[in-house]
Amino acid sequence: MSTKLSALSNLQQRLIVGVLGAALFIGGIIFSEWTFFILFLGLTVLGTLEFYRLAGTAGIKANKVYGTLLAAGIFIAVFLIDKAYMPVELLYLFLPALFLIFVLELYRKEPQPFTNIAFTLLGVLYIAVPFSLLQLLGYLQGEYRWQPILGLLLLIWSSDTGAYIAGKNFGKNKLFERISPGKTWEGWVGGTILTIIVGWVLSMFFLDLALYQWIGVAIIVSVFGVLGDLVESLLKRSLGVKDSGTLLPGHGGILDRFDSLVLAVPFIVAFLKTF
């Protein structure tokens, strides 16, 4: 009986956090570019700190202060450039900032200095760069437009939902058992079908992108969103942890919630900027 109550409580917890989280994200994205900026700057900082905390569980002592400042600086710089408050040439300042980590490690006197350097830079690359690129989707037309960003999140949620329903009801063949035993090919097909359908529906209402662009984004999400989930699972397995964090009750951490986004965004930006 207690097990059933515990399971029900966890389900209720997940539902409440999911609804409130969705409302917060949708509202923050739609309300203004500044609420979007504050929301995702916070996610960038929290996600980077979460990554360094995970690395710390394996005894890796990344320079989390410098890495987090660098991550936040990149996110802020991209926003200021999109707003035309800062010339794009100032991005070159981040080149010496990236290599300064080698000098700083000389004075930290920590074991495995180059492992620390690698994970410090990896945190910036894995978290800050995708979230910074996400901003470019909002400025495809020169001024902030929320439709591409919200549409992308809806496609990711559709992919997860379709994969869960199809996998639960029809899943038999493992997709990548070594990394994530629960994922199946049937689940992936179900997620892909639902995502493409949602992309088609979005093209009717979110007119900032054409039909072929929404379908292209949906296909990218279907492929690289799942791979992003697998990559994050690989990271957690290599570090010996179950969840990336406990910030979101019943949902894990920032990386658990945005693993699909961080891998899919670079491919989506490349696709939309090219076509």
Image (cartoon, rainbow, N blue to C red):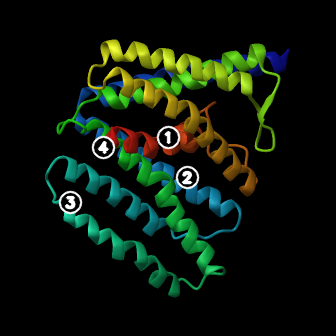
Q: Quadrant of the C terminus?
A: top left
How many residues crowd mark 1 within 10 Å: few (<14), some (14–19), many (20+)?
many
Identify the residue shown where x is 76% and y is 13%. Answer: 169
Viewer-nearest residue: 196 or 29: 196
Tag of residue 8: none
Location of mark 3 (residue): 88
Q: Are marks 1 and 2 in contact (CB under 8 Å)?
A: no
Q: Are marks 4 and 3 in contact (CB under 8 Å)?
A: no
User: Percent from the top left, x then y, of residue 104?
Assistant: 46, 81
What amino acid is labelled 2 in the image? Glu
User: Percent from the top left, x then y, of residue 228?
Assistant: 59, 42
Location of mark 2 (residue): 50
Alpha-carbon span between mark 3 and mark 1: 24 Å
What amino acid is labelled 4 in the image? Leu
**Residue 38 in view (yes/no):** no
Alpha-carbon span between mark 4 and mark 3: 13 Å
Tag of residue 136: 4
Alpha-carbon span between mark 1 and mark 2: 20 Å
User: Percent from the top left, x then y, of residue 70?
Assistant: 39, 64
- Sequence-wise, the earlier of marks 4 and 1 is 4
Location of mark 1 (residue): 264
**Residue 76 in view (yes/no):** yes
Alpha-carbon span between mark 4 and mark 2: 24 Å
Identify the residue shown where x is 42% and y is 77%. Answer: 99
